[in-house]
Amino acid sequence: MDANSSLPMNQSAAVQVIPAGYVVLNIFSYLILGVTFVLGVLGNGLVIWVTGFRMTHTVTTISYLNLALADFSFTSTLPFFIVTRAMGGHWPFGWFLCKLIFTIVDINLFGSVFLIALIALDRCVCVLFPVWAQNHRNVSLAKRVIFGPWICALLLTLPVIIRVTTTTLPIGKTACGFDWSPWTRDPAEKMKVAATMLLVRGIIRFIIGFGTPMSVVAICYGLIARKIRRQGTVKSSRPLRVLSFVVASFVLCWSPYQIAALIATVRIREILLGMGQQLRIALDVTSYLAFFNSCLNPMLYVFMGQDYRERLLRSLPASLERALSEDSAQTSDTGTSSTAPAGAELQAV
């Protein structure tokens, strides 16, 4: 979901003059990107390993595995943006990686928000319709339903797949961004088409890619909270507390960017003409805050369960020993004892 700001920004970054007062902010942005990359890859990689290989597959673990895959794939692309930023907006990786990297970014950022909405919907169904969930909520159904968020993400990423490409700037640098009107070289026509397409795209992305999933989440958690309050178990409901923290972190990380992106969409002509420098900086800063959410998810979804964290940390040395052993003699009992407690803990979340 960062293409609203980063793609147009990349096209003009080469001619952008950053005031001296923002040097510290610029350095801080590198730090945020670096930390997000390291924590995101390690944290989400650990979640993928645990949910994919150490735990019995359930509806819940399948959802968290897909969310970790989305965040892992996205954070893995951050070094490309760090290098491009350090080179003043120049994209040195070629046409193929330009299209591939931005496609990966869009699919996984959209996929993550849709997966969060799906997890909220699943939890809501379990709370409101426990009998139906017990009879019909199974791994087979989950494996089919989980394709829904990815298909929606792919459809919203089609403009990137079709129109993102490399272009040579007048100063000789190569930029990776949208080319909405390859049929013409007239700057006025290109500006007009780009402004129209980015306006439509920005509105669609805000409504479908953020507003609708967050509305689903809000409705689901509202229904869950009402049901639990009626039963008088709010204080003892850890799943509701965990999910509330997850949603709160997502909203806090993404809302500033979404607001800035919506303002930029309305003022897209100013952005394309090189004006609105403060808005560009706001998009820059808020996008890094949004990216940071991708490395928070492992901690919020998994490590908030203290019992699970302790069991996971105790299992790591044994797992490494088995992995590094020349001849491993694992038994089914061993696998069950190491994965079942962790699976039950995450399923409770």
Image: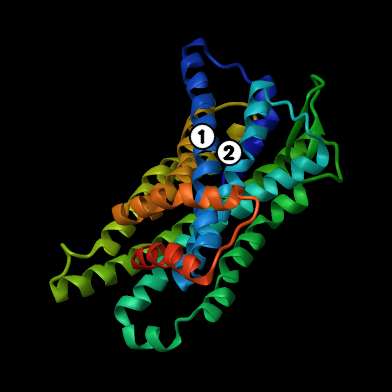
Report the front residue among 150 and 157. 150
Q: Residues within 10 Å of mark 1 (few under 14, many from 20)?
A: many
* Residue pictured at 73% horizontal, 26% vertical: 90
Is residue 250 at least partly visible in the picture?
no
Three-letter amino acid code at the position of disc 2: Ser
Report the front residue among 108 and 40. 40
Task: Describe residue 255's horizontal placement relative to residue 127 as left or right.
Answer: right
Three-letter amino acid code at the position of disc 1: Leu
Image quarter of the C terminus: bottom left
| Mark identifier at residue 177 | none
* Residue 258 on image: x %, y %: 47, 45
* Residue 291 on image: x %, y %: 50, 41
Is residue 22 at least partly visible in the picture?
yes
Task: Describe residue 215's horizontal placement relative to residue 139 as left or right.
Answer: left
The image quadrant that residue 240 belongs to is bottom left
Marks 1 and 2: in contact by CB < 8 Å?
yes
Inter-mark Cα distance, 2 to 1: 6 Å
For numbered disc 1, what is the local secondary structure? helix
State the colouring used for the structure image.
rainbow
* Residue 66 on image: x %, y %: 55, 61
Task: Describe residue 168's horizontal placement relative to residue 203 as left or right.
Answer: right
Where does label 1 land, which residue? 283
The image quadrant that residue 222 belongs to is bottom left
Where does label 2 land, which residue? 5
Task: Describe residue 233's horizontal placement relative to residue 214 as left or right.
Answer: left
For numbered disc 2, what is the local secondary structure? helix
Determine whether 94 is above or below 87 in the image.
below
Judged from this view, the residue extending furthest toward the left is: 232
Is tag 2's residue or tag 1's residue first in the polypeptide sequence?
2
